[in-house]
Image (spheres, helix red, strand yellow):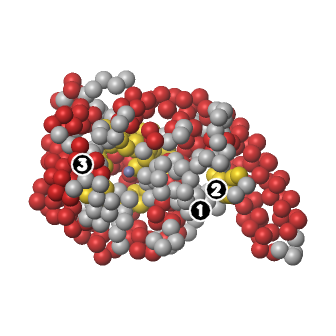
Amino acid sequence: MNAGIDPEGDAGYLLYGDALFRKHRKKGWAYVGSPVPALEAPVADTHAHLAMLSHPALSLARCAVVGVDFVCAMCDPAEGDECERTYRDLDIWRAEALRLLPEVFEATRRNVTAERESLEAQAHAAGKKHAGQAAEAAVLLESVAVDERACNLCWGAEPAIPHMRIACGVHPHVASQWDADMEAALLERLADPRTAALGEVGLDYHYDLSPRDVQQNVFRRQVQLAHVTGLPLVLHVRDAHEDAFRILEEEGWPEAGTLLHCCSVGPDELARWVERGAHVAFGGAVTFQRSDDLRASSAMVPAERLLTETDAPYMAPVPFRGIECGPEFTIFTAGRIAEVRGVAPGEARRALLQQMHDAGVAFLNREPTEWQRAHADIARDAR
Ligand SMILES: [Zn+2]
């Protein structure tokens, strides 16, 4: 699976084929420990553009090892063949991930041993003169041991390739492509029972890639379609919360719920969304150094509506910024949110993680709506 992969590329895991995490250094890739101690409960990635990853199946196999057991794949009928591939290949990616899993475990075990030997040598060489370096190596050593335990644990258990659902919607960036054909294509996808939400839809005044009045019209229409189809909405809102909130007030908030994806606002703006019952998802941005306002927001959302996500392949959490992000990176974001909420590892963190996981799964792993059942015949057969 490593053939032809550029070692200087942006997806280091392809080189190693294991479930460890590495960041890019000048000379190749450097091992980065998983959260220590290991997370006590499974984690859900509620927003991943899986079709855009270099190797979706390998990423799903890595998810199985590190404990990400649910992924919602995002797609957009206006974005080339991304949508087609997502619906067509979803089951293929999962089957391929299952096939890869033994190899991934084996590579993980082998590389854990190699990393441990090299870190032990480094810690030894650093000695007293470089106490800081030695301490750093000791911390990494501990996380290597955690990886090994996690690996051994999963080895004997049922492999949990993530359960997957799909969200489909026309992004505000491409709103200017909206027409009757686009709406018909979207409805065909929404009728597929694997579709769990309409999204991501909304307004983006940061990039302004479509005219604002067009963005608003297309968003308004898709809010109406959420009412028609009975599906919840996944919202992408950037520098446009005033207008997005107003349109939702005018059209009515979907009964099936609303998910504010990639929360980008502080508690002052977020308060009214939470009051309106919105679910709120946090991605890698919550780990960025300058994101104090996002961290404050992640602390104020009630745990039963607090979700984790990646926005893969974008927004890799610290310390992986700039490299390709897969759904398995959600564990770093989940760990950081627990820290921000002052929840210590152990039973308290297990409870919070389980609650966030269950909130994401409950929101997205839903039964087909009445509309979906009635329109199953229009779902485009992509299998
Ligand atoms: Zn997205």
- At x 71% / y 49%, what residue is drawn? 148
Picture quadrant of residue 373:
top left
Q: Residue 378: x and y, percent? A: 21, 26
Picture quadrant of residue 380:
top left
Q: Is residue 338 left or right of residue 279?
A: right
Mark 2 Cα within 10 Å, few/some/many (few <14, many 20+)? Answer: some
Q: Earlier in the sequence, mark 3 or mark 2?
A: 2
Q: Is mark 2 within 8 Å of ligand 1?
A: no
Residue on which disc 1 sits:
319
Of circles 3 and 2, the one toward us is 3
| Three-letter residue code for mark 1 | Pro
Q: Are marks 3 and 2 in contact (CB under 8 Å)?
A: no
Q: Nearer the viewer, residue 9 or 239?
A: 9
Q: Residue furthest left?
A: 250
- At x 69% / y 52%, what residue is drawn? 29
In the rendered image of this protein, does residue 168 appear above or below residue 329? above
Residue on which disc 3 sits:
175
| Three-letter residue code for mark 2 | Lys
Residue on which disc 2 sits:
23
Q: Are marks 1 and 2 in contact (CB under 8 Å)?
A: yes
Give the quadrant of the N terminus: top right
Q: Check disc 2 and report its element: helix, strand or loop.
A: strand
Give the quadrant of the C terminus: top left
In the rendered image of this protein, does residue 244 appear above or below residue 182? below
| Three-letter residue code for mark 3 | Ala
Q: Check disc 3 and report its element: helix, strand or loop.
A: helix
Cα distance, mark 1 to mark 3?
34 Å
In the rendered image of this protein, does residue 32 appear above or below residue 190? below
Cα distance, mark 3 to mark 2?
35 Å
